[in-house]
């Protein structure tokens, strides 16, 4: 089942040429309510990139991007990667494993990007690895596994 246009906005972003939206139309759900505007593209090297725009609400008491926000960006990036450079089918599916190493503090005044590649995709699983960066500055590295959910037959 592909992402449905009636619930998801993944069209071109006119403010950022070459980028596409990655937003649920219901902004009261997690992505919009917590993360804010998300955009995605495929880089020239074939990697998928998901970008967020940090706001004050994304900071911790130290004035850096909260680790939970970085983890959320990573989790969402698994699905943008499936959609952009995998089979194209990012739903329905669920994260079954996520390993993250924080290597730096994210600065709240610059976009935060998750840059990903698919290690392997099977009929039921997608293995992704990537980094979270702000330009050339590394914030985290990660790997994750997503399980594709098959629709259940009607009883």
Image: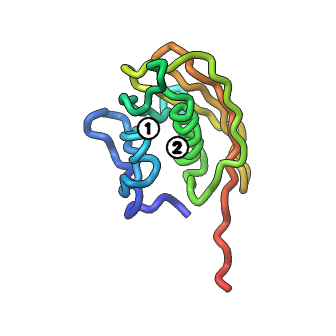
Of all residues shown, which one is farthest toward the top?
Answer: 136
Q: Residues within 10 Å of mark 2 (few under 14, many from 20)?
A: many
Can you say which quadrant of the picture contains the N terminus? bottom right
Of all residues shown, which one is farthest toward the left?
Answer: 14
Q: Position of residue 85 (x, y in %)?
A: 56, 42
SS state under label 1: strand
Judging by the rendered image, the residue that carries numbered circle 1 is: 40
Can residue 46 be seen by looking at this rendering? Answer: no
Q: Residue at x 64, y 70 (%)?
A: 151
**4 is higher (above) or lower (below) than 141:** below
Can you say which quadrant of the picture contains the C terminus? bottom right
Q: CA distance from mark 2 to mark 1?
A: 7 Å
Q: Position of residue 45 (x, y in %)?
A: 54, 26
Of all residues shown, which one is farthest toward the bottom?
Answer: 155
Q: Residues within 10 Å of mark 1 (few under 14, many from 20)?
A: many
Marks 2 & 1, CB-CB < 8 Å contact: yes
Q: Kindly identify which numbered label has been placed on residue 80.
A: 2
């Amino acid at each position: 089942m592909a992402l449905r246009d009636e619930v998801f906005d993944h069209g071109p972003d006119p403010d950022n040429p070459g980028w596409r939206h990655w937003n649920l139309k219901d902004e009261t759900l997690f992505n919009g309510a917590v993360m804010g505007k998300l955009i995605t593209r495929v880089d020239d090297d074939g990697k998928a990139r998901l970008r967020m725009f940090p706001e004050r609400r994304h900071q911790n008491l130290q004035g850096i991007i909260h680790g939970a926000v970085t983890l959320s960006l990573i989790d969402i990036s698994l699905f943008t990667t499936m959609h952009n450079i995998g089979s194209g089918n990012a739903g329905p599916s669920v994260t079954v494993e996520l390993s993250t190493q924080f290597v730096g503090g994210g600065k709240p005044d610059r976009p935060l990007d998750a840059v990903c590649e698919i290690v392997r995709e099977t009929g039921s699983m997608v293995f992704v690895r990537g980094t979270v960066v702000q330009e050339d500055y590394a914030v985290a590295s990660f790997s994750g596994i997503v399980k594709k959910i098959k629709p259940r037959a009607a009883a």
